[in-house]
Image (cartoon, helix red, strand yellow):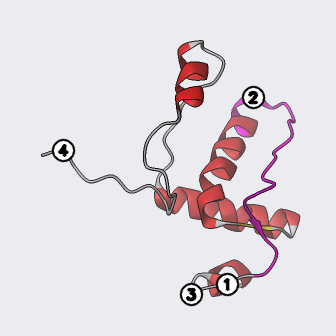
């Protein structure tokens, strides 16, 4: 039996066909981000920008931070559907500490 997969709260645990196609064409790169690294990136983003990303968006934030440090070139980060402007749930204290 393969190990369990944690999808960081995402509702869809597979890979969308369009995303797979972009990967096959070499237009995007797939990376893995560990859960704690993702949440640390979300806290860093919230403290720097004053915007709290939704937990599932933290994986994208972590990838963007990693890419920015690697490439040394600025680029936009767009998270329009994955933002929360107020902390909620038990993790709220971690964001506002």
| Pointers 4 and 2 in contact (C-beta within 8 Å) | no
Comes first in the chain, label 3 or label 2: 2
Q: Secondary structure at mark 2?
A: helix
Magenta residue check for 84:
yes
* Residue annotated with mark 1: 88
Hey, which quadrant is residue 68 in on the image?
top right
Neighbor class of circle 4 (other Cα within 10 Å; few <14, some 14-19, many 20+) is few
* Residue annotated with mark 2: 71
Spatial CA distance of label 3 from label 2 is 35 Å
Comes first in the chain, label 1 or label 2: 2
* Residue annotated with mark 3: 90
Q: Is residue 71 above or below residue 9?
A: above
* Residue annotated with mark 4: 2
| Pointers 1 and 2 in contact (C-beta within 8 Å) | no
Neighbor class of circle 3 (other Cα within 10 Å; few <14, some 14-19, many 20+) is few
Give percent across and percent down for residue 28: 63, 24
Give percent across and percent down for residue 4: 26, 54
The magenta-colored residue range is 69-86
Quadrant that contains the C terminus: bottom right
């Amino acid at each position: 039996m393969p190990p369990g997969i944690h999808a960081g709260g995402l509702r869809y645990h597979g890979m969308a066909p369009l995303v797979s196609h972009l990967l096959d064409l070499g237009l995007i790169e797939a990376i893995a981000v560990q859960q704690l690294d993702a949440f640390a990136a979300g806290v860093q983003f919230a403290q720097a920008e004053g915007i709290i990303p939704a937990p599932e968006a933290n994986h994208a934030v972590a990838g963007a931070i990693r890419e920015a440090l690697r490439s040394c070139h600025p680029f936009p980060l767009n998270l329009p559907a994955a933002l929360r402007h107020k902390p909620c749930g038990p993790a709220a204290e971690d964001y506002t500490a």
